[in-house]
Image (tube, helix red, strand yellow):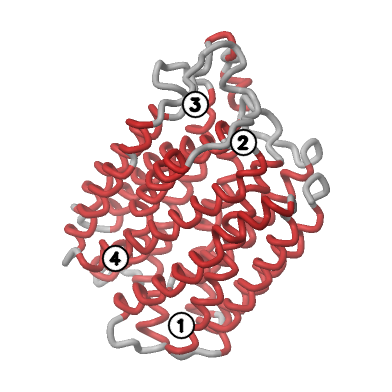
Amino acid sequence: MTTLREPGAALAEPAERVGRGWTAALCLANGAIWVGWYGPLQILLASQAKDFAPGSGMSKETMLAWVTGVGAVASLAANPVFGALSDRTTSRWGRRTPWIVAGAAGGALSLLLLADAGGMWTMMLGWCLVQLTLNAAFAAVTAAVPDRVPRLQRGSVGGWLGAAQILGVVGGTGLATAAGGVRAGYAACAVFTALGVLPYVLRHPDLRLAPADRPEWSWRGFLAGFWLSPRRYPDLGWAWLTRFLINLSNALVLLYLLYYLRDRLHHADPGQGVLVLTAVNGLTLMATVVVGGVWSDRTGRRKPFVIWSGMLMAVATALLAVWQTWPGAIVAAAVLGVGFGVFTSVDFALMTDVLPKALDRGKDLGVINVANALPQVAAPALAAPIVTYLGGYRVLYLVAAVIGLAGAGLVGRIRGVD
């Protein structure tokens, strides 16, 4: 891969297709970051909340909602800020690589600190540190795609990244479950996160931004750049809203899944049940995520794939409300995976197609990725009162289905992408 630092080299629209080795290494790095997130989110944070809740004056659901919600606020700021900083980095190792290394190493250390949390406040602090550091790495990994991948390959690369994402979710859940305890689970996730980024940063040199390409620095300009006007960039605005709503629907499904299995379905081993559902979801997602991205590249169309995948996900979510049995949960997980697989790859390609400026790819993708993190804030705020006071899990999943369906419908408002 080229490491040219002549003015314009890092900002040119990529034309040369990336190879399998580059894609595989980037996917491993991406999956390692998701291991660091979802081992805690699926198993470890819920287990800590269950241990800390007695005597705290709040339920385990409320404690988990506070911890994940505050952590998501940290993520909201971290992703675009670190994306913008990587855009302006002129190090000898490139724009993205320093942030991938620092973010993954910091994330691993933060997971180890979180393992020693003694109550809600230290758990919240540790989770915020995990969110800050891993978002630095994730912002840089995501920005590497529009930096290096031509438009008509982004669906397939996005598909492989989506596959790595779900493998990271499954792997994080598996490590957290199989490690034999909360501390061991955090340690296993930390080690995998740190080691998983090494093949990419060691074997694939990054494009280096020439100092002449770096814009003149000012705090006012830096902060103002985070506002992307929906009037000026309407396609970006509608694409952002679509991603937010569909991810909010998905977050509502995942947040209390452990408690849903324990308290509603009375599953004998809820932790193992989460792992089974995650694996089923992952298998069906893997069956469609790459195929959907490749198919989208070949047709040159994005919107129909996003619309129909969003509708299918809404149907799967509604199944959790109307068919509240273990077989029903398995079917819902399978159908949700089919829809989310296509959505993951094609929506990512659609987002890169509506980016305004090459210089701000990292920052703009960070703003877009707020649509991934903001649902983690909104989901606890919506889910906790619904489960506690407004009808329980049946109403929760019906609300989630309606939200996802609205997101799918708004894709039609995007005009600049087919």
Q: Amino acid at mark 2?
A: Asp
Please give the name of the residue rendered at 39% of the width and 52% of the height, measured from the top-left corner: 34
| Residue 340 at x, y percent in the picture | 57, 65
* Mark 2 crowdedness (10 Å alpha carbons): few <14, some 14-19, many ≥20: many
Q: Secondary structure at mark 3?
A: helix
In x, y percent, where is residue 148?
Answer: 55, 32
Contact? badges 3 and 1 (CB < 8 Å):
no
Sequence-first tag of 2 and 3:
3
Q: Residue beneath label 3, please?
A: 85
Asked if the residue at tag 1 contacts the one at tag 2, i.e. Cβ–Cβ closer than 8 Å, the answer is no
In 3D space, how far apart are the residues under numbered discs 3 and 4 (Cα atoms)?
34 Å
Q: Which mark is residue 174?
A: 4
Q: Which residue is mark 1?
A: 330
| Mark 1: secondary structure | helix
Question: What distance separates the C-alpha of mark 3 from that of mark 1?
Answer: 42 Å
Q: Disc 2 designates what residue?
A: 364
How packed mark 3 is, by other alpha carbons closer than 10 Å (few <14, some 14-19, many 20 or more), is: some
